[in-house]
Image: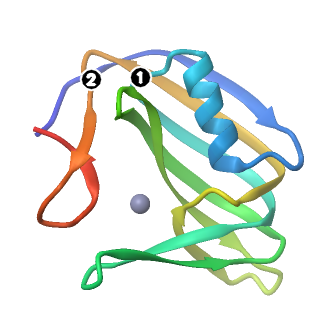
Amino acid sequence: MQYHVQQQGVIIGRLQRGDDLLGALTAICREHGVLLGRISAIGAVETARLGYYDQQKRAYEYHTTEASEILTCVGNVSLRDGVPFIHAHLTVGERDGRALGGHLMDGTVVFACEYTIDILTGAELHRGYDETTGLPLWQE
Ligand code: ZN
């Protein structure tokens, strides 16, 4: 499956210290009616909660970090259960310069964050259960 979509506009802003990174970005998309989009962000987190999907067990494992830099947070916006839903991955940099990353989970607390949301139009992508992976992927 693939779609040719158009860029409609861009939302740029910053989050507040203490915000939940995933929750705050999701709220912005829902407030602005972003049904399809692309997300990127940089900044720092007080703690990150990262997911790793065990492909055999078909379940997420989680790990948390201490205060670290948001080296990159990239993701997309589509629809799950009819409402805007963000799938994002986060790479953080620790004190010694090492990078750690994973699936962005709730529980990631913002220290400072500058984000950009590209609003896309021209298709609706809906997530639904995918038998072969056990994940909520885009449906055909
Ligand atoms: Zn993911």
Residue 124 is labelled as 2
Ligand 1 shown in quarter: bottom left
Q: Secondary structure at mark 2?
A: loop
In this rendering, the answer to whether 57 lies above or below 43 is below
> Considering depth in this image, is 84 or 13 the residue closer to the camera?
84
Q: Which residue is mark 1?
A: 35
Residue 32 x, y percent position in the rendering: 58, 15
Q: What is the x, y in percent for residue 82? A: 36, 26
Image height of 58 relative to 78, above or below: below
The one nearer the camera, 9 or 79, is 79
Q: State if disc 1 and disc 2 touch (CB < 8 Å).
A: yes
- Badge 2 amino acid: Glu
Check mark 1 vs ligand 1: CB closer than 8 Å? yes or no: no
- Neighbor class of circle 2 (other Cα within 10 Å; few <14, some 14-19, many 20+) is some
Q: Categorize mark 1 by other alpha carbons within 10 Å: few (<14), some (14-19), many (20+).
A: many
Amino acid at the residue labelled 1: Leu
Q: How many marks?
A: 2
